[in-house]
Amino acid sequence: MSSCALDEECTTELQVRRNTVYETFPGEELRIDCPVVFCSNSPPTINWYKTDDRWVYLNNDTNHIVTGWETSGLSKGIFYLIFKNIVSNDSGIYRCEGGRSISHNINVTVNVYFKCALICATAKEPSKSETTNAFLMYVYCAAGIGAFVIIVIILSVICMQGCKRNSNPLPSRRTSERKTTAPPPEPRISGDNVQLYGQVVQDRKRLRNATQAGEANANVVYASLNHGPAPREVTRPHRQMEETEYAAIRLT
């Protein structure tokens, strides 16, 4: 806010614009500049101040801030102030002074709540890759469940058809073979009684043949008559089995 005099005396000019504002977040590094135009070849002595009910000189010996020069010519340069790790207490009004010159105020704002809201919004907002991965996961899960349901339905239908077939089974060869009665085993005859057993069998055959011959003769006689009443069937006399030596045969 100083001006160069028209006389031979030359003063330092601090070219800070009006309503200069710096905004940042906690933990960031912030640099504020104070452009200076001076008359001599060497930069003048410039200091930084902060208002806190009164203007307080900022000491460069602390690890929190750093001040320095950045020259751009023989009579121009920038005197800067760097906050290495700015905090919310660094918010306030600053200005630079050199000799009889005082700069315009510089407003520094540390947005604590805005950064928290920005971090929360960024954390809640899923990225495109995460959204795509989640969608693919849902698709794979749905496909797996659908395939499992189809397999279960197919197995159920196959089991139901098998049960219907088993309810009316066809008779198998084994069951039919089991139901057929086997013929009674022939009696075993010892070697000594084979001849006697043969004679008994021959006698039975002769008796059976004689009986069949008598019945045939009776039918022939009936056919030669004048169709009279058919004679009653002659009851065959019951022959008593004579006791012979064949009764001693034992079948084993």
Image (tube, rainbow, N blue to C red):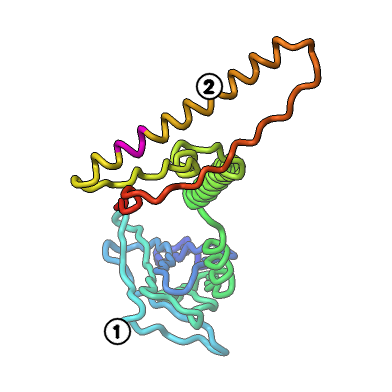
Q: Nearer the viewer, residue 189 or 70?
A: 189
Q: Residue at coordinates 50% horizontally, 64% vertically from top-left?
A: 16
Distance between mark 1 and mark 2 Cα atoms: 156 Å
In the depicted structure, whether residue 194 falls above or below residue 11: above
Q: Is residue 76 visible?
A: yes
Q: Nearer the viewer, residue 159 or 246?
A: 246
Question: Based on the displayed image, in which of its 4 quarters is residue 205 positioned?
Answer: top left
In the depicted structure, whether residue 129 falls above or below residue 63: above
In the depicted structure, whether residue 231 falls above or below residue 63: above
Q: Nearer the viewer, residue 249 or 77?
A: 249
Residue 86, image x and y in percent? 43, 75
Residue 213, label in figure: 2
- Amino acid bearing label 1: Asp
Magenta span: 198-202
Q: Is residue 199 magenta?
A: yes
Q: Residues within 10 Å of mark 2 (few under 14, many from 20)?
A: few
Label 1: element kind: loop
Q: Residue at coordinates 74% horizontally, 12% vertically from top-left?
A: 225
Task: From the image, tell me which residue sits under label 1.
Answer: 61
Mark with earlier residue (1, 2): 1
- Amino acid bearing label 2: Ala
